[in-house]
């Protein structure tokens, strides 16, 4: 495996009216566990069901109903922790987080404050320019999701849908290691990629399966380094939390807007108040939602209906043994085994389906050529048709046939694109297309030489110019290819033209 090393990206700097400022960002990502049943009930987690149709008695907080832990949800949390190189706590416990909201039937949320299932880990966040930052994970804890309040169905009342109530969430809490809006989006994208590889969360932000609370603060240049040395948060500014973000683009906008708001306050001699805020993308502003609560405001205490959760190291080791190859390892292997560039390997490992397609196509073939065809031709065509790789009309075996035909000089790269298009639109096999459509490349040197001689004889003035400027030889190559319907072997044509013009 290759040893991938990166430089650390420079922190984002924003110019205030008086001085420059840097950003400090931490994120709390809520990821819905991929499970058919909820955390403490057997109710379905299917998205898009009729309102209040996926609700068990315990979800609705009916009297006398007791929670029963879903072992599979625990396994998914452990799997996620292992994928993030995190410590797995063999003993954890559930707490009640007390607050009132109409879509929280119990009047409390079962969460893990004091003893989370997963401890410290890390994520390597690559920025695409040769730089990368290691973002430390502080913890991952399990908790049940709340329901959904709907305010736009009636002008005089609100409605509550409890379908989401009790769905298992993993809250992934980072350290304040992120230094800019682009890094924040890249971090979230990397988390989503890893969890999709693991199969622990589908990462669909539109359906609410993944959303983020973003903590933003500002500091003067040099203060962050002092915080790193001492771990003393007094070197950093007061943070504000931007709640429930479910768009990479809006997260970046919100961070920028909130940072500028804080800079304006501090430079005017004011103090930033720690609070929870909401981002309005239309007005491009954040507005106060509520003062930031502390743990004691929620009156946390151990849930009396749930025993402490104890798991065995042997079980954790078994889960570790079943982990798939993760994105960083797969990318390094693609670069080493197939000689791919960092960029190409990143594109191909962006998701499991793309990586699997490429690997099946490249097996026993030139990896760089396979990558070029998958990324440029296939991905380009799929994007044009708004299709996913799983919907590709061209199978890896068919694309492999096209690459084999080029490698054997049966067709040229130009003809190969025509073969690909026919295969894409009709599903016909490339070998059959080349045979029946008469698309085989002309490799007979005698026939090609005759075409070259004919073009040269018909254009004496152009010959004289080409002798003075060898770069003009390309004109003759183009004429020969045109005369042979594009079927002549380009390499042979180039060699013969160069030889004749000398």
Image (cartoon, helix red, strand yellow):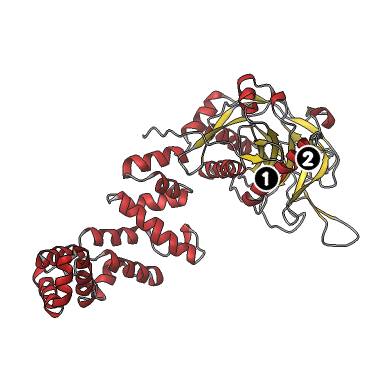
Disc 1 is placed on an element classified as helix
Q: Quadrant of the C terminus?
A: bottom left
The answer to the question of whether label 2 and label 1 lie on touching residues, with beta carbons closer than 8 A, is no
Q: What label sits on residue 90 in the rendered view?
A: none
* 358 lies left or right of 223: left
The furthest residue to the bottom = 458
Task: Report the residue at 61% width, 51% height from top.
Answer: 204
CA gap between label 2 and label 1 equals 16 Å
First of labels 2, 1 by sequence position: 1
Q: Quadrant of residue 496?
A: bottom left
Q: Quadrant of residue 111?
A: top right
Q: Nearer the viewer, residue 284 or 214?
A: 284
Q: Nearer the viewer, residue 328 or 492?
A: 492
Residue 187, image x and y in percent? 57, 40
Q: Nearer the viewer, residue 449 or 146?
A: 449
* Residue corresponding to mark 1: 256
Disc 2 is placed on an element classified as strand
Residue 322, image x and y in percent? 47, 36
Q: Residues within 10 Å of mark 2 (few under 14, many from 20)?
A: many
Position of residue 64 relative to residue 102, above or below, is: above
**Can residue 459 be seen by looking at this rendering?**
yes
The furthest residue to the top = 230
* Residue corresponding to mark 2: 276
* 211 lies left or right of 343: right
Q: Quadrant of the N terminus?
A: top left
């Amino acid at each position: 495996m290759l040893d991938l090393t990166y430089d650390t990206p420079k922190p984002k700097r924003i110019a205030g009216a008086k001085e420059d400022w840097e950003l400090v960002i931490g994120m709390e990502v809520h990821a819905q566990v991929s499970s058919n049943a909820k955390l403490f009930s057997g109710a379905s987690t299917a998205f898009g069901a009729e309102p209040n149709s996926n609700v068990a008695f315990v979800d609705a907080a009916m009297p006398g109903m007791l929670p029963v832990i879903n072992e599979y949800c625990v396994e998914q949390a452990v799997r996620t922790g292992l994928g993030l190189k995190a410590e797995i706590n063999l003993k954890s416990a559930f707490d009640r987080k007390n607050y009132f909201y109409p879509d929280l039937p119990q009047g409390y949320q079962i969460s893990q404050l004091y003893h989370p299932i997963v401890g410290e880990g890390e994520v390597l966040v690559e920025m695409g320019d040769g730089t990368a930052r290691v973002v430390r994970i502080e913890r991952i804890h399990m908790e049940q999701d709340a329901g959904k309040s709907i305010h736009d169905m009636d002008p005089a009342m609100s409605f509550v849908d409890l379908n989401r109530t009790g769905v298992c969430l993993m809250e992934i809490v980072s350290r304040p290691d992120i230094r800019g809006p682009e890094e924040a989006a890249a971090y979230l994208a990397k988390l989503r990629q890893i969890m999709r590889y693991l199969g622990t969360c589908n990462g669909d932000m539109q359906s609410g399966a993944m959303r983020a609370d973003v903590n933003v603060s500002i500091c003067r240049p040099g203060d962050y380094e002092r915080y790193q040395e001492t771990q003393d948060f007094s070197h950093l500014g007061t943070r504000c939390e931007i709640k429930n973000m479910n768009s990479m683009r809006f997260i970046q906008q919100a961070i920028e807007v909130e940072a500028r708001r804080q800079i304006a306050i501090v430079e005017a001699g004011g103090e930033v108040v720690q609070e929870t805020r909401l981002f309005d993308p239309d007005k491009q502003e954040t507005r106060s939602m509520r003062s930031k609560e502390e743990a004691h405001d929620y009156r946390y205490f151990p849930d009396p209906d749930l025993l402490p959760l104890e798991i065995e190291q042997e079980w954790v080791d078994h889960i570790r043994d079943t982990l798939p190859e993760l994105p960083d390892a797969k990318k390094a292997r693609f670069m080493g085994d197939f000689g791919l560039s960092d960029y190409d390997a990143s594109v191909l490992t962006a998701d499991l389906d793309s990586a699997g397609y490429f690997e099946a196509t490249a097996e026993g073939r030139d990896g760089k050529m396979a990558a070029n065809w998958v990324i440029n031709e296939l991905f380009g065509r799929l994007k044009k048709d708004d299709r996913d790789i799983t919907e590709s009309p061209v199978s890896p075996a068919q694309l492999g046939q096209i690459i084999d035909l080029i490698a054997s000089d049966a067709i040229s790269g130009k003809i190969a694109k025509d073969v690909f298009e026919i295969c894409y639109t009709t599903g016909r096999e490339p070998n059959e297309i080349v045979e029946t459509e008469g698309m085989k490349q002309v490799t007979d040197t005698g026939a090609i030489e005759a075409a070259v001689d004919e073009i040269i004889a018909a254009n004496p003035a152009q010959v004289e110019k080409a002798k003075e400027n060898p770069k003009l030889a390309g004109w003759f190559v183009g004429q020969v290819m045109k005369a042979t319907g594009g079927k002549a072997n380009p390499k042979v044509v180039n060699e013969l033209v160069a030889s004749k013009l000398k």
